């Protein structure tokens, strides 16, 4: 089993909700962005469960929001926390960065950079592979990881590029089967005939960022289903009522067997600038453990702001 693929899989999963974190420790994500009004009788809105499933499966706006960043300058504030076995913070990373794309060239300027605690090895590399992945994907940003590569076939892609494709599928089009992830590929297809029976579907209306009317579509493991019968314990998607664009996604994943054990929650939120959707917040909480490798515990909070069209 490829350890890097398993960890990367755990790291890059996606959604939005005001739900409290699942892991009992410090949570850097304290921004409340959605307020739920009430449950919704979707039939009275001339909608049904399959309408929401189809919207999740067919949506392209969520992925395009990350591609849209290449047209903007913006500020990113990134916070990383690592934990010991007692869930006490033992490492901190803070970065404030100015991203720009003047004349089509992506540039990053560090305006603040602070590290403390157990973050780096003696050779200067990060202690945790989770943090290394975070740094590569989110601090290196969209320029390579959220923009679709042109002219690259499946045959000539490197191994890392193949991993990225699998992760993009999980983040931007959840519910599909993702082949190549050891032992759990079949557990990603939550809307398929084998797994759908294990989930309940809930609907609500609310306000996002105090002003945007939204639907909340929650896919949740039934209480009668054992935790390890499924991998995705909950997936919540937030839709703009007016155009059904996805504004956010939250995923709670937990799975354990003799080979590995992970417990991961991730939140991604978007907002509109100049009528284009752009990411404004990404948060992650996760533990993972596989044989012959140090257990990893980490959380991240990424906030993007001050978008300016270039």
Image: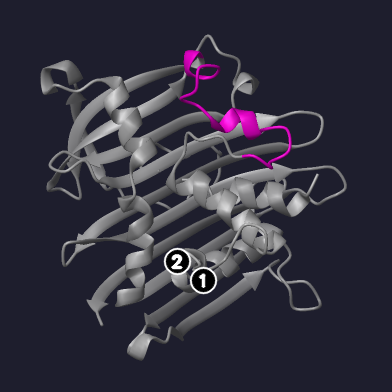
Q: Which residue is mark 1?
A: 144
Badge number at residue 271: none
Residue 95 position (above or below residue 211): below
**Span shown in magenta:** 179-197
Q: Is residue 71 visible?
A: yes
Residue at (69% x, 44% y) in the render: 288
| Of 227 and 175, the residue lying toward us | 175
Please state which of residues 249 and 68 is positioned toward the viewer in this rendering: 68
Question: What kind of secondary structure does the magenta stretch mostly adopt?
Answer: loop
Q: Secondary structure at mark 1?
A: helix
Q: Are marks 1 and 2 in contact (CB under 8 Å)?
A: yes
Asked if the magenta segment contains residue 183, the reply would be yes
Residue 218 among those drawn in magenta: no
Residue 272 position in % (x across, y down): 21, 59
The image quadrant of residue 241 is top left
Front-most of residues 42 and 51 = 51
| Quarter occupied by the N terminus | top right
Note whether 106 is above or below 12 in the view shown: below
Is there any visible trace of residue 297 in the rendered image? no
Distance from the alpha carbon under mark 1 to that under mark 2: 6 Å
- Total labels: the figure holds 2
Q: Is residue 196 left or right of residue 228?
A: left
- Image coordinates for residue 62, horizontal then vertical, percent: 34, 51
Establish if 111 lies above or below 10: below
Q: Secondary structure at mark 2?
A: loop
User: Which residue position is annotated with label 2?
Assistant: 147
Q: Residues within 10 Å of mark 1 (few under 14, many from 20)?
A: few
Tell me if 192 is positioned left or right of 213 in this view. Answer: right
Taking depth in this image into account, of 38 and 307 the one nearest to the observer is 307
Q: Which quadrant, please, contains the C terminus?
A: bottom left
């Amino acid at each position: 089993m490829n350890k890097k693929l398993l960890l990367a899989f755990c790291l890059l999963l996606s959604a939005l909700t005001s739900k409290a974190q699942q892991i009992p420790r410090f949570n850097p994500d304290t921004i409340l962005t959605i307020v739920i009004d009430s449950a919704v009788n979707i039939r009275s809105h001339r909608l049904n469960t399959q309408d929401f499933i189809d919207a999740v499966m067919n949506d392209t706006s969520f992925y395009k929001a990350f591609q849209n960043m290449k047209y903007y300058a913006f500020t990113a504030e990134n916070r990383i926390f690592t934990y010991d076995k007692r869930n006490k913070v033992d490492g901190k990373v803070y970065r404030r960065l100015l991203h720009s794309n003047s004349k089509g060239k992506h540039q990053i300027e560090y305006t603040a950079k602070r590290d403390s605690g157990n973050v780096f090895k003696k050779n200067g590399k990060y202690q945790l592979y989770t943090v290394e992945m975070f740094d590569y994907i989110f601090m290196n940003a969209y320029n390579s990881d959220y923009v679709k590569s042109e002219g690259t076939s499946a045959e000539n892609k490197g191994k890392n590029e193949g991993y990225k494709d699998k992760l993009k599928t999980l983040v931007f089009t959840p519910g599909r089967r993702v082949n190549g992830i050891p032992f759990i590929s079949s557990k990603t297809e939550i809307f398929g005939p084998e797994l759908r029976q294990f989930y309940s579907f809930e609907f609500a209306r609310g306000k996002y960022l105090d002003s945007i009317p939204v639907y909340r579509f929650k896919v949740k493991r039934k209480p009668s289903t054992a935790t390890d019968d499924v991998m995705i314990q909950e997936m919540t998607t937030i839709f703009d009522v007016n155009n059904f664009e996805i504004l956010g996604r939250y995923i709670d994943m937990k799975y354990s067997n003799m080979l590995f054990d992970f417990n991961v929650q991730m939140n991604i939120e978007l907002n509109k600038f100049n009528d284009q959707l752009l990411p404004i917040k990404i948060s992650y909480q996760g533990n993972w453990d596989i044989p012959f490798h140090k257990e990893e515990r980490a959380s991240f909070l990424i906030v993007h702001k001050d978008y300016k069209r270039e």
